[in-house]
Amino acid sequence: MKAIFPAPFSLENTQEAFKARALELFAFQYKYNAVYYEFCRLLKKTPQQVQTIEDIPFLPISFFKTHQVITQLPLEPAKAFAEIKPLDKSTDSLFYFTSSGTTGSETSKHFVPDLSLYEASYMTAFEIFYGPVENYCVLALLPAYLEREGSSLIYMAEDLIKKSRHPQSGFYLHDHEALYKTLLDLESKNAPIFLIGVSFAILDFSEKYGMSLKNTIVMETGGMKGRRKEMIREALHEKLGSGFGVSKIHSEYGMTELLSQAYSKGDGIFDTPPWMKILIRDTEDPFNFVGDGKTGGVNVIDFANIHSCAFIATQDLGKTFSDNSFSILGRFDSAAIRGCNLLVP
């Protein structure tokens, strides 16, 4: 069954509609998100002064490591996003996702009081890009994520596996032989397969079991996580394409601090769902934006982040293109490599 998006995401796919909704959500989070309000106040930015998307302040992603970025404690009904109620309780009992981090590093914490928003986001996006999940047998090779708690990627993969309703869908921790036999069996039946894996794991698998897959979408989620030497995406995809016998390797661009994902069907070029947008900021002046084809810092608008912050300045480097697609080129030099981050050239 097709996932129905909550009302805040039901918008026409036009620039005007996106701008209007972005400004509404900015006003809402300015009013009810104490951390974001203080950030905007220090920048002297108010809803009255913000008239374009480019005027909106983008919260540095590092705030998710040091603050509780959350909307709560309304004093009166919100004029914008009236159908979404800000939180009125302590965060002590709230559900949250955490980033993997590296040894000794701080991890991000993303409070998600309404998991239906996240579920609607990834299910609807999956259907936009790949069709109903019921059409696939979903196989997940995500060992590093399965071995810890709080992964938003595992939550999504687990739900995709469940909703695929295929008896052979499932996770493969370290059992590469079982995955190999499953792929052979499914391929022999011409069954459509969706294989999603963290980069180091599917690279290890492809090097051990050379295959020629005809009915399988292979998607890497990025990140060597210290398991292997970092590789540029082109080199990784060349190795994976050769190992799996496929012409294109798909990719997912997502992170703990976002509840939406962008997808690439090959060549490292990503597209966003209608409720998500990428802007590129100047590396020397974070309050200015650069045009298409120019490298800069990646800012993300994600309407699914209603209860946290929808306007995030990441530590990734990338560029946008005239058709609203984008590519990820690496990370700022000062940024630690994040476990779910894409590869650094």
Image (cartoon, rainbow, N blue to C red):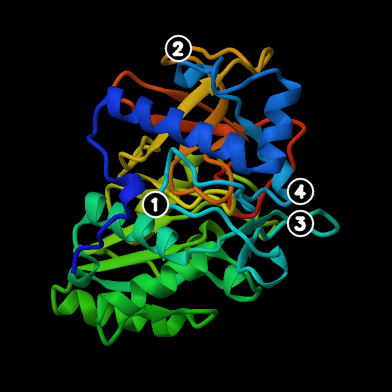
Q: Secondary structure at mark 2?
A: loop
Residue occupying image coordinates x 30% and y 39%: 274
Nearer to the camera, 69 or 344: 69
Considering only order in the chain, which callout, 1 or 4, is on the residue closer to the N terminus? 4
Considering only order in the chain, which callout, 3 or 2, is on the residue closer to the N terminus? 3
Considering only order in the chain, which callout, 2 or 1, is on the residue closer to the N terminus? 1
Question: Which dot, 1 or 2, sits closer to the camera?
Answer: 1
Amino acid carrying mark 3 in the image:
Thr
Considering only order in the chain, which callout, 4 or 3, is on the residue closer to the N terminus? 4
Badge 2, how many Cα within 10 Å: few under 14, some, many 20+?
some
For residue 110, which quarter of the picture? bottom right
Q: Secondary structure at mark 3?
A: loop
On residue 83, which mark appears? 1
Considering only order in the chain, which callout, 2 or 4, is on the residue closer to the N terminus? 4
Considering only order in the chain, which callout, 3 or 1, is on the residue closer to the N terminus? 1
Residue 199 seen anywhere in this rendered image of the structure:
yes
User: Which residue carries the number 4 mark?
Assistant: 67
User: Which residue carries the number 2 mark?
Assistant: 291
Amino acid carrying mark 4 in the image:
His
Q: Position of residue 44 (x, y in %)?
A: 70, 17
Question: Which dot, 2 or 3, sits closer to the camera?
Answer: 2
